[in-house]
Image: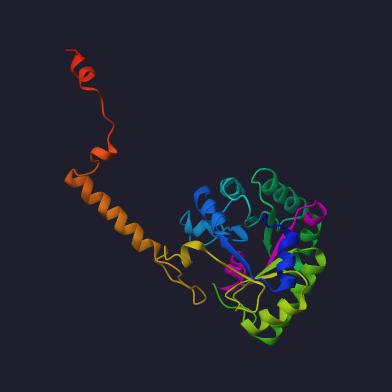
Amino acid sequence: MKNTVATLMSQKQSGDKITMLTAYDYTTAKIMDECGVNTILVGDSLGMVMLGYENTLPVTMEDMIHHTAAVTRGAKNAFVVADMPFMSYQTNVYDAVHNAGRLIKEGGAHAVKLEGGAEVCEQIQAIVNASIPVVAHLGLTPQSVNAFGGFKVQGKSAERAQKILNDAMKIQQAGACAVVLEGIPAALATIITKRLTIPTIGIGAGNGCDGQVLVYQDMLGLTTDHIPKFVKRFASVKDMMCQGIEAYIQETKAGTFPSEEHTYSMPEDILSSLQMED
């Protein structure tokens, strides 16, 4: 079934948890789509897991369009959300609408995601007015890593928790169709989920949200760096990859690959008729 803004809203209303994973290329998106994931996020996390940056800040619009287009070619049923990279929407409303439009028009995304609360409501409303669905992002917003002083859990104090709750209500009023809640206490995320009519997607926000999202390299055991507390490894794909790569190296060096079954044959009479030039 094709996933849309309407089906995601229906899932919230019925209590059917929404599944979301990140993807950044055609092959991975196609596999996830075949597995039945509801939503694919082309996250600016690609800056770290695909491009090797220390954080998401260096990611460009061109990066996001390139990877989003690859994902949308592979995903036929999943609802594809593309992140708006750092400084693609913060400067002014015009830039926000223009860049959101590029992710839809050139990247083929079904919706865009941007970070922030009350301070970006004007941008959210303008993008929605341009008929582009917007997913908001509250709590630990990675593009604010320098302002936060690192990747730290947000909303622990009464003041910060109240701001996140207020921001959630404001981004809904501005027209957001869903919101990602990252790195906040589970109890706070549950309160927000109950207060909002739009779906909440949690990452490090407990199971009281309407759905969950994880970076696929984390949940499949492909990453070897620091793994956040909220990540569960559902498979150890890195181990399987290493086994396959090591076996390839061994067989290639031993001369056992390629074997006859992986080799094209040639009629003997044609082979014997070949003339070698001096």
Q: Is residue 240 above or below residue 71?
A: below
Q: Is residue 64 left or right of residue 251?
A: right
Expressed as whole percent of the image width and height from the top left, the position of residue 161 reads 69, 82
The range drawn in magenta is 127-150
Q: Is residue 159 left or right of residue 224?
A: right
Residue 178 located within the stretch drawn in magenta: no
Query: Residue at position x 39%, y 66% from top?
Result: 236
- Number of numbered discs visible in the structure rendering: 0
Q: Looking at the image, can residue 261 be seen?
A: yes
Q: Is residue 140 left or right of residue 245?
A: right
Query: Residue at position x 34%, y 63% from top?
Result: 239
Which residue sits furthest bottom?
158
Expressed as whole percent of the image width and height from the top left, the position of residue 137 reads 67, 67
Query: Residue at position x 71%, y 51% from top?
Result: 100
Q: Looking at the image, can residue 83 be seen?
A: no
| Quadrant position of residue 227 | bottom left
For the C terminus, the quadrant is top left
For the N terminus, the quadrant is bottom right
Task: Report the coloring of the rendering.
Answer: rainbow
Q: Is residue 67 above or below residue 156?
A: above
Expressed as whole percent of the image width and height from the top left, the position of residue 8 reads 71, 64
Expressed as whole percent of the image width and height from the top left, the position of residue 274 reads 21, 15
From the viewer's side, name the closer residue of 255 and 184. 255
